[in-house]
Image (cartoon, rainbow, N blue to C red):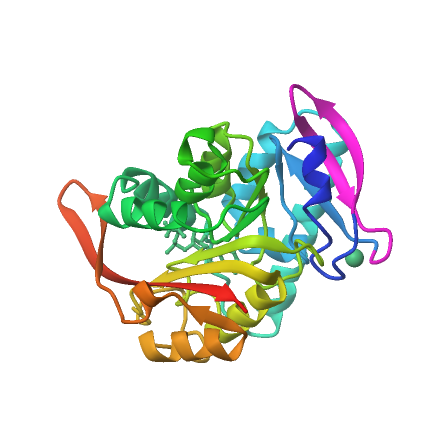
Amino acid sequence: MWERDKEFIRCPRCGGGLELDMFMEGDEIQEGILSCTACRLEFPIIDGIPIVWDDIAEYFARRVALGGRLYRIVQSPKMRVFVKKTLLSAAASARASAAKGAAAAYDRTNLENRWSQIYRRSGDSEFYHVIKERLARLPSGRRALEYGCSVGTVSNHLASPDSGHAYEVVVGIDSSYDAIAQAKGAGTGACYAVGDSTSCITGRLRFDLVVALNVLELIEPLELIRHMSSQTLQGASVAMADPYDFERGPGPVPRRIDEHLLRAALVEHGFEISADTAEPSYIPWRLEINTRTVLNYKVDLVIGART
Ligand SMILES: C[S@@+](CC[C@H](N)C(=O)[O-])C[C@H]1O[C@@H](n2cnc3c(N)ncnc32)[C@H](O)[C@@H]1O
Ligand SMILES: [Zn+2]
């Protein structure tokens, strides 16, 4: 994490600024704690990656193997203490849930790691070429934000000088630590954080472009659109795409959406749909699951401009 990234990452509970206590620094901040003085919440930076999750113990309760792995790689004594304390409280909350008869939470570590590799392998799919070409035609702006950025295929493109964009700041948010680690590894200078897209992780900052691709089965669509709308000013753009495959994902989102409802919701939240995405599209999104399995989605892309 670069020191300047602190400007763009806020407390996910109150949206307030975060203070940095740095434990270890290389070119970037490697280990440290970001803390909100208002909520008294603390968020670790581990191996250069900020984990800005409202309930950090709950994050690791659902990712026990990741917690163990990170505990083994942290170097500074203060970070060791922080991670150990967090893992103990994650284990205590898992025991309390079990005592109430709840089923043990599924450990998401391997699933998230596996999918981050699939997205990395699939970065050359036609879908990404189409979206990059379409984004290059948007009016230029200073700041871009991507929710559910995964391994950074689009965020890193927006941050790289040869993309034809002039964004000074690109922020990528994803709930998967391993995906963010891969995104950051590209070294494009984009600001990455592990976080929940429906939290106020970028506070009251406004962006010229907000992107959310293939996430509607995982993040409640109408809540996400409301959130994206609140982060844009007049003239800003949003780009959303989805295959509307609501049978995938860890569990059903409460309200499903389709190509017509997505457009209607964007219009309701103050966006004008671009003429070339007014009709539903079927862009091939090819995911290479393994050497013998390919998932061929047809994705609908919608671009909106804030009126
Ligand atoms: C289907 S993938 C799409 C990745 C990328 N947008 C693309 O199109 O290549 C969905 C991504 O959303 C992330 N995700 C799921 N729920 C999230 C949440 N609540 N907040 C942030 N990211 C989330 C997952 O970790 C995953 O990387
Ligand atoms: Zn706070």
**Whether residue 256 is visible:** no
Q: Is residue 176 above or below residue 274?
A: above
Q: Position of residue 11 (x, y in %)?
A: 73, 54
Residue at (48% x, 60% y) in the render: 238
The quadrant of the image that shows the C terminus is bottom right
Q: Is residue 15 left or right of residue 302?
A: right
Q: Position of residue 130 (x, y in %)?
A: 28, 49
Q: Is residue 274 above or below residue 264?
A: above
Q: Quadrant of residue 48?
A: top right
| Residue placed most toward the observer, 220 or 258 | 258
* 205 is within the stretch colored magenta: no
* 35 is within the stretch colored magenta: yes
Residue at (38% x, 65% y) in the render: 274
**Whether residue 219 is visible:** yes
Q: Is residue 44 left or right of residue 286?
A: right
| Residue placed most toward the observer, 7 or 179 | 7
Q: Position of residue 131 (x, y in %)?
A: 34, 50
Magenta stretch? Answer: 18-39
Q: Position of residue 235 (x, y in %)?
A: 55, 60
Residue at (16% x, 40% y) in the render: 291
- Of the four image quadrants, the one with ligand 2 is bottom right
| Residue placed most toward the observer, 93 or 293 | 293
Q: Is residue 125 left or right of residue 167?
A: left
State whether the magenta stretch is mostly helix, strand or loop.
strand
Q: Is residue 39 above or below residue 164?
A: below
Residue at (77% x, 30% y) in the render: 22
Residue reaching furthest to the top: 26
